[in-house]
Image (tube, helix red, strand yellow):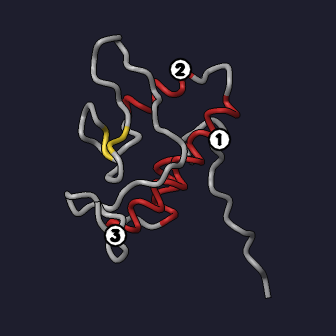
Amino acid sequence: MTGGRARTGLPVPRLGPYADRPRPYPPGHPPHVPIRPLWMCRACGQPWPCAEARLLLRVEYDQNPVELAIYLSGLYHEATHDLFRLNPHDGPTPRELFERFVAWGPYRRGMVEPPAVDR
């Protein structure tokens, strides 16, 4: 490694939260965890968290929604850093990444538009 880049030319991921969830289901199948720094699903190749990962995470954290929210928020932070370093000009916006990583989680609320101001 030279200058913080792997031999592939991709930036080296930071040592933030380790994306080891969801656990493989059924056991023995490839886990739906991200390949960093690309943040693509290792099992299906979709942007992570893919639909299968979201479903498995909801089941795995069913009794611990706060832990799921913290886990997703940490990974959102790491993905924002990784993806911006990969492509600072055409990558997803922070809002798009928030929708992808956090907004679907256990504390999802609809967007509230500010009230119109009558003048």
Residue named by callout 3: 3
Identity, as a three-letter code, of the amino acid under mark 1: Ile
Q: Tell me which corner region of the image, top left, top right, bottom left or bottom right, holds residue 22.
A: top left
Marked residue nearer the N-terminal end (3 or 1): 3
Q: Are marks 1 and 2 in contact (CB under 8 Å)?
A: no
Residue named by callout 1: 70
x and y, in percent, of residue 46 in the image:
28, 42
CA gap, disc 1 and disc 2: 16 Å
Identity, as a three-letter code, of the amino acid under mark 3: Gly
Query: How would you rate the neighbour count of disc 2 (Cα within 10 Å): few for under 14, some for 14-19, many for 20 or more?
Result: few
x and y, in percent, of residue 105 in the image:
58, 39
Marked residue nearer the N-terminal end (1 or 2): 2
Q: Residue furthest top?
A: 27
Q: Tell me which corner region of the image, top left, top right, bottom left or bottom right, holds residue 119.
A: bottom right
Query: Which disc is residue 59 wearing?
Result: 2
x and y, in percent, of residue 55 in the image:
45, 27
Figure check: 9 above or below 55: below
